Amino acid sequence: MRRRKRMLEELDQDIRDHIERETQDNLARGMSPQEARYAALRKFGNVTRVKEETREVWSVIWLEQLLQDVRFGLRKLRKSPGLTAVAVLTLALGIGPNIAMFSIADAVVLRPLAVEDTARIVRVSNTKVSGAYDADASSSWPEYEAFRAASRSLSGIAASDRRGVLLRRGEEARLLLANVVSPNYFDVLRVKPVLGRVFGEGEFQAPDAPHLIVFSYDFWQREFNRDPRIVGTTVIANQLECMVIGILPRSYRGTESVLNPDVYVPLPTWYAMNSDDRKYYSARDFREFELFGKLQPGATPLQAQVELAGIQKRLSEQFPKTDSDRLITVKLDREQRGEQMGRFAALLFCITGLVLLIACANVTNLLLGRAEARRREVAMRLAIGASRSRLVRQLLTETLVLASISAIFAYLLANWVIHLLPSLMPPVGLPVGFDFRMDTRTVAFAAVISIVTVFIAGLAPAFSSIRTPISAATREQVIASGKSPGRLKNVLVVAEVAISAILLIASGLLIRTLIAVRGQDLGFDQARKMLIVTFDTSGDTAAQYQVFLHGLLERLPALPGVESVALAGRIPMWESGGGANKVVWIPGLQTSPGDDGVHVGYTVVSPGYFSTMGTRILRGRAIDGRDIQTSQLVAVINEDCARRLWPGQDPIGQHFRVGGSQGKDVEVVGIAQDGHYNEAVEDQRPYMFLPLSQESYGDALLLISTKVDPRSMAGSVRQELHFIDRNALVLATTTMDEHMQFALYENRLLVKLVTSVGVLGLILAAVGLYGVISYSVSRRTHEIGVRIALGAERSDILRLVLARGGGLALTGVGIGLAAAFGVSRVMTNLLFGVGPADPLTFIVVSAVLFFVALVACYIPARRATRVDPMVALRYE
Amino acid sequence: MSTKEQRERIELLQGTLDLLILRTLRMGPAHGHAIAKAIEFNSDDVLQVEQGSLYPALHRLIKRRWISVEEGVSENNRRAKFYRLTAKGRRQLMVETSKWDKLAGGIARILRPAEQKGES
């Protein structure tokens, strides 16, 4: 390229010199100066053309032609904006999910651990040989030490366990996900910190070794806004002062792709925080550590496996009680990842690949329709000497332009989906998430997939248009030759409509379910404005804790904006999972064998709980201030519990024993309405409410029903907590609204997923229908012209075209509805408050589909009515 | 005339001109004007091409690295560009010459069929 520039720069001078020389020669022959110059110029010829031709010598022909084709393609696409928009949308919808899938697969499976020598990192899994499926595959600390001491094929083994750590931040606290690791963790998994350093085994030899921790990048960003000054300072974690010595790079997200630990704590520091754990961790049967090893250069995972299995065998002989029946496997980390997610990813790729294929088929239809309309143009170009290969190249370039524009939109779409994904994850308060990145790898993938698209979608239309005979150029309309490849296309469109019908009906039923779930009476007021606070106090004894709780109930109701305040062990559908049970016994109770009573779910509550939560007391009284530690033990039971224990009798004033036939005597003082306690959709179950003051219950939730936006109360509530106990910590605050969002998380996620796939299917079906109909219209332009010439009204033509599209749509909807009947029966267990053959859903979905289908057909149909009979017939 | 035929004819002319340039440079480096003169002289004015068309041809040969360019001083003490045959160009000239001879022979046979028959 530089050579080209240099050569061309001097061309002007060369030509001038040449003419000058010729002029000199002519002068020598005796011409007059003017004559000599003219003769020289004449002999030289057209200077501009010479320059032009010389420049051409240096130009890269294919590149210039490509640019030309791209410009031409852009012009063509601009000329038919409707078709372009539809094709771009379709391809973007086809390519986008594939890019998103790739970036997910990349984050979860493909991208290797961001450590040195990642190809040599192995995972040691330790499972039970027999019996129950053991998902953990973890090892005990004694096993780890034995492996480490005796292994020769591994240059190092590291251990890690996941725990929670309470980090103090001023007057608040954060619950962090910690990786408790062996001191040599970073000696084995070598990670280069972005800031500071990581710890090494050598630092912990002395008994008074410093307490060190390392933060993850994400946590550093989230909590400290990437403040570099944090490195070298001390923080208080689990009441212990620790030095933050480094920040890990963004790319290192622990050894699990999904859970990214916030902090890495070496085991000696962990023991300083939690001295009790030394006892647990040193137990031979306390298997909590995941083990990672680094192979010696040249060693294989199999060698390591044989070696570790041998070490384990000796342990099992030495400690048969705890160490027998174990199976050791060693696998490359890379392979392990592939196995974990490989099949899942492959399945998802199949689905997104199918979406892409359907999108390509649709675009092929669109392009075929346009190729038909362009036959004359192509024939003309062939006639004036364009070569067929050149034309195919040019037509494919047009598709490439289309695919490139689509790829940009697809990329944006994928980016949007990827950034939406975290919001689809359950709000569990753990640093759950994938390291999604839209990086060069995804860009490269997008480029490859677009080129594939060009060939899938573009080849058939391109070859179809160059098969035109040259003679066609002279005719105004070209009657397509050969059999119409319509059958396959019709099948495709019918299938698209049918699939989207199934998906939309599924999504309709799920939406109705969600509405029904939300609308049901859960046994409390889910619409209430309420702040739910989890907290921690410094009080060590139960008595101090009770004093603190008393303080809360006394002081908080006085805050402006507060309606009522209560405490509860848990509230319905709380994230701690299934509620606790107690065995309840009354004389003469029929129990199942082995049980000493019936299991009744329960929670402990403070006075004011029922009014705060909006749970109705049907008979008797609520738990109130009369129920203290020293008074008669009491309970409020729900209707279901009353029905089971005392069918047909008045339970108020009755007594039962809690904890079996030998348990404590408890008096029933009230009956509360039935409710749902563990899940939004569940069967009626017996439940009871016990006074908080009469139970030695650990943690309680603080429930504050407010008159104003509950979030705005968080600050003043925190102040009150600190007023009562200077060291009290607010761990988390949530609102009833957020709590219900979480409780219905699965239902909502399902609705979102099925609906978005359904809508995607609908769009693709509509585009498919549009493509097929407009193709058939362009093929039948001549016929339509004849019909109009013979007196057909525009409305007749409209009906003719719409009938064909409508027929296809009806067939598709019909098949879809029939299939949906079958599918919805299978999903009965996902449905609630709506039958699998819900007529409303079926009618609405059919109507929507049919309407969309008609709109898709109407556009080409209207074009058909505008056919000018004179143009259609002139050249007959 | 289709573009294809036109292109072939141009190619033929270009090929001829290229060959003539290479043959001229076999005698030693020369500047543009000198090459034009030599071609005019050697081909008995049979190939009456405009002198300008020499330049695209020269550039074509440079691009193929059959000839190279160097700065020099011409016979009348003026700065000029000298074109020189490269080793690659010399090889190409041999190939081209034999091709050319074949073609010339073929034309001769068509033009004088009797003589050709007599020869064989």
Image: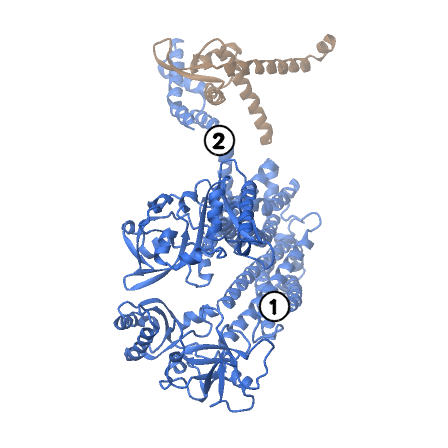
Q: Is A785 or A7 nearer to us in this picture?
A: A7
Instruction: Pinpoint residue A402: horizontal percent, then vertical percent.
Output: 52, 47
Q: Is A234 or A317 nearer to us in this picture?
A: A317
Q: Are marks 2 and 1 on the same chain?
A: yes
The residue labelled by disc 1 is A827
Say which mark, if any, is on residue A60: 2
Instruction: Pinpoint residue A468: horizontal percent, then vertical percent.
Output: 65, 43
Q: Is A694 or A870 nearer to us in this picture?
A: A694
Q: The brown chain is which one?
A: B
In the rendered image of this protein, which colour is used for chain A? blue
User: Sequence order check: which comes first, mark 2 or mark 1?
Assistant: 2
Q: Mark 2 lies on which chain?
A: A
Question: Can you say whether A262 is above or below A720 in the image?
Answer: above
Instruction: Pinpoint residue A252: horizontal percent, then vertical percent.
Output: 42, 48
- Name the side, left or right, on which A833 lies relative to A688: right
- Name the side, left or right, on which A776 lies relative to A438: right
Tell me the crowding category of disc 2: few under 14, some 14 to 19, or many 20 or more residues within 10 angstroms, Cα based.
few
Residue drawn 46% across the image and 55% down it: A418
Residue sitting farthest toward the front: A318
Residue drawn 48% across the image and 73% down it: A580
